[in-house]
Image: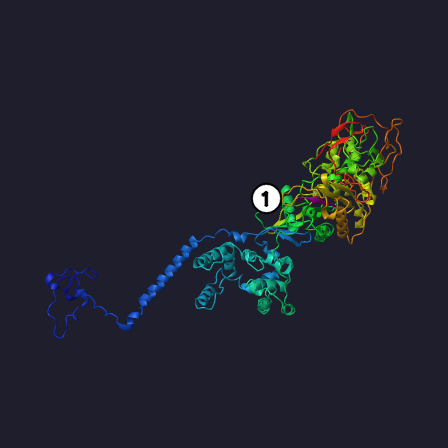
């Protein structure tokens, strides 16, 4: 017998071994014991199958088993987790939609009030720091009080909103501020399942990549507040006419209320909705108190801040379009912004225009020109007006008139460069003469009391004899021997054409450019005709040049923009360079003779301003434009009335316009200048001119055949008395005639070679206002010269 323990049933296999295969006959079951069925006799060891469960019948078939429930839950969880992972991986944060980033460029007066917006979308994005903390709290109280502590999405709120929508309780918001921002900025407002799914995943990703402050800033800049205002800055302007940084807590709470339903809570557009709006406003403020963002006592003292009236879309009608176009040109021309960059919008551009003076200029043009037009008068259809005004001390353009309405006449009459400036150019000739210490052909020094021959159609004499140019005076009037000052008062063409030749046309041109006239101005050619104003500088160009004279010869380019920002960041502006363009004596001596034009010459209407003033009238060829350019010590302004066919755009003569035979610079332009200047300077003390005029000499009279010594024919002293002792300038004897054509240099030296100043005074032909003269607008034709020769005149 073996020593190993015996297994039960006589099995000798060790424990844990696999059982041996049974013989085939052993597998056959024997007869069942009495009392047992075959089914009952199936021990486990035999490997017989368990009996099947009976099938469920009846209502039990509808009840899932616990296994089915568990499997279903696990499957749903697996699908949700998989779907979330897949969605998170597949849905990226997209680029912002075009509408969300679209803004308008905002143009402002110097005081910050809005002039115009040039985009279809009324939005101005700002930094969160620019929004007062109380206003931010008001928005959170209205929309999402747990914003800073919650997750990007609120699952319960989403399901609640969805359930309410499905069950017919109306569409309700279940979105956090983050989700609303994602909808506004990245997606759209469509109500679709796909959009909601994208919103969900983008919100989660965005919350991981941006701070809460960044998200809130984006939300405030993209939300719609009604009145075509996108973003809280545009809303503040639309409802209260102020920047968001200036609104009160009560006003901020009202703006926050609008986020829920803008149209429903605009109590001005829909007065019947005021109870609902007030209730919502109270809800916001009470929420601020509850969150401890607002003191209860301060809350109790607040009253409902009724917003301002609904304003029509701030389009480019009236003067707005002219200003916007001028500002855009200024930014591009000065390399501040190029056109493509400016077209991206979103810029906040503060101009130098002063609202009070802008309104005064518009009113003056209306009173003195446009109100006198008549629809039944054919010539009045052609009337156009341009105006500009500059502060000589700063170069700031403080007012501009471009036309009756940008939507009707889109060309800016203040900046266009296609009308002759006429006799307003003549002061530049005299300024150049003094600046260059110029002399006449026979060597007499040019001063206000220098005698010239004012004979009509007098041939201009050069160093080598007749030049072939013999311009007519206005109305063919002859003056004989006449001083420069009187010739300026009466705008005598014969005198100034000869003076331009005496100084040297190229030097005259240089002086005009230095004063502020663009060097590429059409017809600014160095010939004697330059004196009569055939050049086509703009109203703004002429204002800049006259401002230089008012600033005692110091010139700096005009300034139209003082600040540019985008998204709270400053854009660098170029500094303004000021230089002594011509000597103070040259500028001030010019001012002295231009004072005489206002006191008793063709510009007497300008005395209506009630201020010490200097100025010059001018008329373009064939009376196509009439000008008055003038200045006080603290304001330079130019007004031009132009004729243009509204259908063809061709320049037209102004004969018969405003019911007058002709329009002269001393008429409507000077009257407009006077009304505007008086209104613009109202409330400021009147200032006298402080002048250092060039010392006059006794060497001024026309030489005669008997005696070349100075005579006393018509001679007079300058119209303004020096207010301080002028620098000493040595007198000299007449020099021999020059032999070099066009040369005007004086051997004794001078004050420079054609420096520049900003302003030009009207020294053209007489206006024919009070003394029968014209502006010197007639510049052409075959004219009889004093030497008996006929030569074609130079026409523009």
Name the one closer to the observer, 755 or 577: 755
- Dot 1 falls on a residue whose secondary structure is helix
Look at the image and tell me in which quarter the C terminus lies: top right
Q: In the image, which residues are magenta?
A: 637-644
Q: Is residue 278 magenta?
A: no
Res 426 → quadrant: top right
Q: Is residue 289 visible?
A: no
Circle 1 residues within 10 Å: few <14, some 14–19, many ≥20: some
Magenta span dominant secondary structure: strand
From what the image shows, is residue 348 above or below residue 522? below
From what the image shows, is residue 522 above or below residue 387? above
Q: Is residue 211 visible?
A: yes
User: Residue 290: horizontal and vertical position, in percent?
Assistant: 58, 68
User: Residue 43: horizontal and vertical position, in percent?
Assistant: 18, 68
Name the one closer to the observer, 532 or 473: 473
In this figure, which residue is indicated by the disc labeled 1? 339
Q: Residue at x 78, y 52 (%)?
A: 684
User: Residue 641: horizontal and vertical position, in percent?
Assistant: 71, 45
């Amino acid at each position: 017998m073996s020593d190993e323990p015996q297994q039960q049933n006589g099995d000798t296999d060790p424990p844990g071994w696999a059982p041996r295969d049974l013989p085939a006959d052993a597998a056959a079951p024997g007869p069942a014991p009495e009392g047992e069925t075959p089914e009952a006799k199936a021990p486990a060891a035999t490997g017989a199958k368990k009996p099947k469960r009976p099938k469920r019948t009846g209502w039990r078939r509808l009840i899932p088993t616990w296994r089915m429930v568990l499997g279903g839950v696990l499957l749903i969880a697996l699908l949700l987790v998989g779907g979330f992972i897949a969605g998170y991986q597949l849905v990226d944060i997209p680029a912002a939609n075009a509408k969300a980033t679209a803004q308008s460029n905002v143009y402002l007066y110097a005081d910050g009030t809005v002039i115009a917006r040039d985009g279809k979308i009324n939005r101005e994005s700002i930094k969160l720091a620019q929004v007062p903390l109380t206003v931010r709290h008001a928005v959170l109280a209205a929309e999402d009080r747990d914003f800073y502590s919650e997750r990007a999405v609120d699952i319960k709120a989403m399901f609640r909103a969805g359930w309410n929508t499905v069950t017919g309780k109306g569409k309700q918001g279940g979105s956090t501020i983050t989700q609303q921002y994602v909808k506004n900025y990245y997606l759209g407002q469509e109500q679709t399942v796909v959009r909601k799914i994208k919103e969900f995943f983008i919100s989660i990703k965005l919350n991981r990549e941006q701070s809460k402050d960044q998200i809130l800033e984006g939300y405030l800049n993209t939300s719609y507040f009604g009145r075509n205002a996108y973003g809280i800055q545009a809303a503040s302007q639309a409802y209260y006419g102020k920047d968001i940084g200036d609104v009160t807590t009560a006003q901020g709470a009202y703006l926050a209320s609008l986020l829920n339903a803008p149209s429903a809570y605009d109590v001005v557009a829909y007065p019947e909705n005021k109870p609902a709006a007030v209730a919502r406003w109270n809800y916001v403020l009470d929420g601020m108190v509850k969150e401890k963002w607002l003191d209860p006592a301060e809350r109790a003292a607040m009253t409902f801040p009724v917003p301002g009236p609904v304003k029509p879309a701030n389009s480019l009608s009236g003067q707005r379009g002219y200003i916007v176009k001028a500002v855009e040109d200024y930014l591009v021309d000065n390399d501040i912004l190029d056109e493509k960059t400016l077209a991206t919008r979103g810029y906040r551009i503060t101009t130098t225009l002063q609202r009070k003076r802008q309104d005064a200029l518009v009113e003056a043009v209306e009173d003195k020109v446009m109100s006198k037009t008549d629809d039944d008068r054919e010539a009045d259809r052609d009337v156009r007006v341009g105006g500009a005004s500059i502060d000589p001390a700063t170069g700031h353009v403080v007012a501009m008139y471009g036309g009756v309405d940008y939507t009707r006449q889109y060309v800016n009459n203040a900046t266009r460069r296609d009308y002759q400036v006429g006799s307003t150019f003549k002061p530049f000739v005299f300024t150049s003469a003094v600046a260059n210490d110029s002399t006449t052909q026979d060597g007499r020094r040019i001063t206000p009391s220098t005698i010239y021959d004012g004979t009509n159609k007098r041939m201009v004499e050069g160093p080598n004899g007749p030049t072939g140019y013999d311009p007519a005076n206005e109305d063919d009037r002859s003056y004989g021997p006449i001083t420069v000052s009187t010739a300026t008062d009466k705008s005598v063409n014969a005198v100034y054409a000869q003076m331009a030749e005496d100084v040297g046309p190229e030097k005259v041109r240089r002086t005009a450019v230095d004063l502020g006239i663009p060097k590429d101005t059409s017809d600014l050619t160095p010939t004697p005709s330059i004196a009569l104003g055939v050049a086509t500088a703009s109203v703004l160009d002429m204002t800049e040049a006259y401002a230089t004279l008012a600033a005692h010869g110091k010139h700096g380019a005009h300034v139209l923009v003082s600040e540019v920002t985008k998204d709270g960041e400053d854009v660098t502006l170029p500094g303004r360079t000021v230089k002594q363009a011509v000597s103070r004596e040259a500028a001030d001596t010019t001012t002295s003779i231009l004072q005489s034009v206002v006191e008793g010459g063709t510009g007497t209407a300008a005395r209506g301003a009630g201020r010490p003033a200097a100025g010059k009238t001018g008329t373009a060829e064939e009376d196509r434009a009439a000008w008055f350019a003038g200045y006080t010590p603290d304001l330079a302004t130019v007004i031009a009335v132009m004729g243009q066919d509204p259908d063809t755009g061709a320049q037209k003569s102004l004969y018969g316009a405003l019911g007058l035979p002709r329009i002269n610079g001393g008429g409507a332009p000077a009257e407009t200048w006077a009304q505007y200047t008086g209104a613009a300077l109202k409330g400021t003390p009147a200032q006298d001119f402080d002048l250092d005029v060039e010392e006059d000499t006794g060497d001024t009279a026309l030489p005669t055949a008997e005696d070349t010594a100075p005579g006393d024919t018509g001679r007079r002293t300058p119209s303004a008395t020096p207010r301080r002792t002028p620098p000493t300038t040595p007198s000299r004897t007449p020099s021999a005639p020059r032999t070099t054509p066009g040369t005007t240099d004086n051997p004794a030296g001078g004050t420079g070679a054609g420096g520049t100043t900003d302003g030009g005074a009207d020294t053209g032909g007489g206006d024919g206002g009070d003394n029968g003269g014209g502006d010197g607008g007639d510049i052409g034709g075959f004219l009889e010269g004093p030497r008996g020769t006929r030569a074609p005149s130079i026409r523009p």
